[in-house]
Image (cartoon, grey):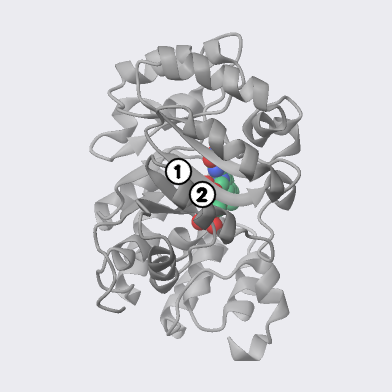
Amino acid sequence: MTDSLRTDIKVYFAPMEGLTDAAFRRVHYSLFRDADAYYLPFISPTQNLVLNGREKRNVLKEYNAGVPCVPQILTKDPEHFLWAADLLADQGFTEINLNAGCPSATVTAKGKGAGLLKNTEDLRRLLDRICTASPLPVSVKTRIGFESADEWEALLPIYADYPLKRLIVHPRSCRENYDPFRLHRECFIRAAGAYKGELIYNGDVFSAEDAQQLQSGVPCLSGVMCGRGWVADPALGREIIGGAPLNKEEVILFHDTLAEEWQRIYQGDIVFMKLRVVMKHLACCFENIRKNEKKIRKTRDLKELLQTDRQIFNTCDLRKDAAFIPDEILKEQDATHI
Ligand SMILES: Cc1cc2nc3c(=O)[nH]c(=O)nc-3n(C[C@H](O)[C@H](O)[C@H](O)COP(=O)(O)O)c2cc1C
């Protein structure tokens, strides 16, 4: 890391539905205290205006004690948003985030998530109402368009018209999903000049060097939000703010503590399925990624998975450039080199 790295950059853990649940956040924060906040996987209020069990376990304060968290709402209905905002204000949160980025077809078909970007009049109406009436400051996590990145020029001035707590930008259109070959950082950099509020970058930041490059290209960058890269390297946030890189003992401790905590909470195959996804990410930081990935994929139950994970920890060292690698890129690389 070079001397020019600013260490006052904020680091936010991205919401990842199914993965970064309350137990994950508690375990991660207890071992790595670097996140300025964990953005919570969305809750999606409907006409019934009740939280389901999973949503309660996600947002109620007894599950988040001592962990800096920002809840996220997936809706197109301002009154549903405000109902949730009241409830979340009572839970002690100090910010509420609007999801304008979820690319799932079932979500966008209902005009929610990235579906909000299809109709800018509706987006304005939603922001008008929630920014006026919300008891909590509102932030937005957005993509840069629905069909294409060209829509960003029209979208950014809309966000600039509202007193947002912060704007988190994932520079892909909804159609681009998480395609590693389509990421429009230049759009984000253009936005940085024009946008006067707090701007956070999100998307494919998998190493501290990458965050550093972003910072040098965008001097007014307030922070970065990392998801897959931070699951793969649980010390990524620490390294981005100038701390030590990951070491093997802490990966193992993180894995084991999380496995234990999830087994305490969940029954049946849930722990197996969740832990397998986490281990697929963690395996990116170890040698023999392709071989290990196959072994992890072949496991059929938690016992087998825990044995496989232990074998990987016992026999493989951390890679020198330990970092997340998207599947699409992994497939393109020669397995013998990694
Ligand atoms: C499994 C999974 C679940 C996600 N769940 C959410 C979510 O609930 N809310 C949200 O805003 N983004 C969600 N995202 C998107 C991430 O927050 C983030 O924007 C995306 O992974 C890109 O950042 P990264 O390249 O640092 O991973 C999810 C992504 C994944 C892969």
Please state the horizontal and vertical placement of residue 336, each as a whole percent of the image: 64, 91
Please state the horizontal and vertical placement of residue 197, each as a whole percent of the image: 38, 39
Residue drawn 59% across the image and 17% down it: 125
4 relative to 146 in the view: left or right: left
* Quadrant the N terminus occupies: bottom left
Viewer-nearest residue: 314 or 254? 254
* Quadrant the C terminus occupies: bottom right
Please state the horizontal and vertical placement of residue 330, each as a whole percent of the image: 66, 75
Mark 2 vs ligand 1: CB below 8 Å = no
> Is disc 2 surrounded by few (<14), some (14 to 19) or many (20+) residues within 10 Å?
some
Q: Is residue 15 visible?
A: no
Q: Is residue 54 visible?
A: yes
Q: Amino acid at mark 2?
A: Ala
Against 273, residue 79 (above or below) is above
Q: Quadrant of residue 70?
A: top left
Q: Secondary structure at mark 2?
A: helix
167 relative to 288 in the view: left or right: left
Q: Quadrant of residue 124?
A: top right
Whether the residues at callouts 2 and 1 have beta carbons within 8 Å, the answer is yes
Q: Which residue was labeled with disc 1?
A: 195
Against 227, residue 131 (above or below) is above
Q: Quadrant of residue 4?
A: bottom left
- State the CA–CA distance, disc 2 to disc 1: 6 Å
Q: Which residue was labeled with disc 2?
A: 191
237 relative to 321 in the view: left or right: left
Residue drawn 29% across the image and 70% down it: 5
Viewer-nearest residue: 14 or 212? 212
Q: How many marks?
A: 2
3 relative to 159 in the view: left or right: left
